[in-house]
Image (cartoon, rainbow, N blue to C red):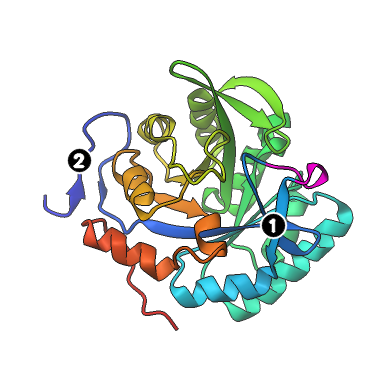
Amino acid sequence: MAGFLFPASGFRPLLPVLARRVIPCLDVHDGQVTRGVQFGRAESGGLRNVGDPVELAVRYNNQGADEMVFFDITASSQGRASMVDVIERTADRCFMPLTVGGGIRSVDDMGLMLRAGADKISLNSAALARPELIREGAAKYGSQCIVVSIDARRAGPGRWEVFAKGGRESTGLEAVEWAVRVVGLGAGEVVLNSIDADGTRDGFDLEITRRVSESVGVPVVASGGAGRLEHLAEVLVAGRADAVLAASIFHFGDFTVSDVKEFLAGRGIPVRRTPPI
């Protein structure tokens, strides 16, 4: 049975050991990539401009990124048109899969982004407002296209609450329970964002990542808190995530995607090794 991963606990099926993915994330506001701390908002001065989204995507593609995530934090009709343009131009120049989220509220919105060149659609607040949207998207485009992003904040010992609207509004839902529900509705992947750790660069929330990973049978992407290379290895091993999503460490030049993969491979964590262009 060599080559198979046997989890110590939880309900995940026995699967071949797959390469762990390294995924840069681009938060796009008014056509520019921005970065904040703990979901800082543009109107409060909590965001700083990082650069052009297409140029950054090309950079990370050339460094060997496994995927790219775009979040449209403008969430307006004007922003939607801008994001379509960004995805079209990125798809023309990059070969990695693209995931798009932010302001997608209908199956028609999903189709617009998929036709522009996206491979996956990320749902968050829209899924919270109307969970059936997950099922509708999976029925039309397949579960492999539907990602649910969960913004979670610690609410007490052993409990994390799900937040909507960019981390501003508590839903009262428990994060692990919501993750199980969205997978039941047809989500093919979960992105777990720790609001407490987001942008702090102090490390991922390993406990909630592990709990969600052990409770669902789809890939879990850990997000929020990457600051050192050790943090990414920890969340893949101790947190049992299938992929890591990061922004600040890439945008501000701390590390390249290639640096991350070299480090993970050195720790015995399987990654896809693509020579940088």
Does any portion of residue 130 appear in the rendered image? no
Q: Amino acid at mark 2?
A: Phe
Q: Secondary structure at mark 2?
A: loop
Q: Nearer the viewer, mark 1 or mark 2?
A: 1
* Mark 1 burial class by Cα count in 10 Å: few <14, some 14-19, many 20+: many
For marks 1 and 2 on the same chain, the one whose residue lies earlier in the sequence: 2
Q: Quadrant of residue 70?
A: bottom right
Q: Amino acid at mark 1?
A: Thr
- Is residue 261 shown above or below 136? below
Nearer to the camera, 276 or 66: 276
Q: Secondary structure at mark 1?
A: strand
Identified at 68% across, 23% down, the residue is: 170
- Is residue 66 shown above or below 130? below
Please provide percent x and percent y for residue 62.
Answer: 49, 78
Identified at 46% across, 44% down, the residue is: 222
The label shown at residue 263 is none
The label shown at residue 34 is 1
Instruction: List the single residue furthest toward the bottom.
Output: 277
Nearer to the camera, 42 or 98: 42
Please provide percent x and percent y for residue 252.
Answer: 56, 63
Please provide percent x and percent y for residue 274.
Answer: 36, 75
Does any portion of residue 154 appear in the rendered image? yes
Instruction: List the single residue furthest toward the right.
Output: 78
- Is residue 55 shown above or below 73? below
Q: Is 236 displayed left or right of 181 in the figure?
A: left
* Mark 2 burial class by Cα count in 10 Å: few <14, some 14-19, many 20+: few
Quickly name the residue at label 2.
6
In this picture, which residue range is highlighted in magenta? Answer: 40-45
Q: Is 202 displayed left or right of 155 in the figure?
A: left
